[in-house]
């Protein structure tokens, strides 16, 4: 079975759960949450502070549950859910902005200057963190490029896309035990490549 077949089967499974929820089977919504919780979290991670992702993700699925009867299959379900996710993120910032405006209205001039200094410091820290993350991504991309295709595939599935070992095995067409062995060996080779790249940089 190809990856396309797997995706189609997964989509059919989710659509069946959508139908069951609309028909009154509330417990079937857990299937939808399980299928898309990583997608929602990934989308929110690009829009929100890390500490707020879980709370807003819960809000996303509450909204999706309430809106399921309006889903008309005009677009793929994940596109529909991502639209709800983006609206939830925007509402988060609207609420945060309103609270911030109310708080700033109670501050004197010295307090406002202190808030501005803190914000500038936070921006600088975020820029530093972003630069560090970008450097790490470049290192990882360079290391992955040196791995064999099989090693690169298992690392991508398990480490980068965070699939379970069972799911990785299914996608790779092997048993779970074989996938675990492949992942162990691939991690070891990746570590060796990263070590070599660091040594080359410091020569």
Image (cartoon, grey):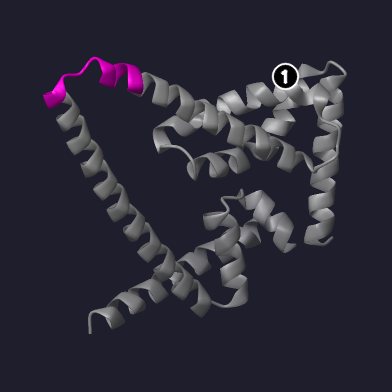
Quarter of the figure with residue 33: top right
Q: Is residue 141 above or below residue 56?
A: below
Residue 10 included in the magenta stretch of the image: no
Residue at the left extreme, as displayed: 110
Q: Is residue 167 above or below residue 198?
A: above
Q: Is residue 101 above or below residue 8?
A: above
* Residue at image location 65% in from the left, 32% down from the top: 84
* Residue at image location 62% in from the left, 52% down from the top: 165
Q: Along the line of sight, which residue is nearer the eye, 167 or 3?
A: 3
Q: Give the tally of numbered discs.
A: 1
Residue 66 drawn at (x, y percent) = 72, 19
* Residue at image location 62% in from the left, 72% down from the top: 150
For disc 1, the neighbor class at 10 Å (few under 14, some 14 to 19, many from 20) is: few
Q: In the rendered image, which quarter contains the C terminus?
A: bottom left
| Overall secondary structure of the magenta section | helix
Q: Along the line of sight, which residue is nearer the eye, 165 or 107?
A: 107
Residue 107 drawn at (x, y percent) = 20, 18
Residue 153 drawn at (x, y percent) = 61, 67
Which residue is tagged 1?
Answer: 66
Evaluate whether residue 142 shows in this view.
Answer: yes
Secondary structure, mark 1, is helix
Q: Is residue 46 left or right of residue 61?
A: left
Range shown magenta: 101-110
Q: In the rendered image, which quarter contains the N terminus?
A: bottom right
Quarter of the figure with residue 12: top right
Residue 102 included in the magenta stretch of the image: yes
């Amino acid at each position: 079975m190809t990856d396309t077949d797997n995706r189609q089967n997964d989509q059919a499974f989710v659509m069946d759960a959508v139908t069951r929820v609309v028909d009154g089977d509330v417990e079937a919504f857990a299937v939808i949450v399980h299928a898309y919780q990583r997608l929602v979290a990934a989308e929110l991670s690009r829009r929100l502070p890390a500490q707020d992702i879980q709370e807003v993700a819960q809000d996303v699925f509450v909204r999706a549950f309430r809106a399921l009867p309006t889903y008309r299959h005009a677009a793929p379900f994940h596109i529909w859910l991502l639209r709800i996710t983006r609206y939830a993120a925007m509402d988060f910032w609207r609420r945060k902005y309103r609270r911030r405006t109310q708080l700033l209205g109670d501050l004197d001039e010295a307090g406002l200057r202190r808030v501005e200094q803190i914000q500038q410091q936070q921006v600088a820290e975020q820029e530093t963190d972003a630069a560090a993350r970008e450097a790490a991504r470049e290192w990882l991309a360079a290391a992955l490029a040196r791995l064999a295709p099989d090693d690169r595939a298992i690392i991508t599935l398990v480490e980068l896309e965070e699939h379970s070992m069972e799911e990785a095995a299914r996608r790779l067409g092997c048993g779970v035990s074989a996938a675990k062995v492949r992942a162990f060996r691939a991690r070891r080779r990746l570590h060796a490549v990263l070590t070599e790249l660091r040594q080359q940089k410091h020569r």
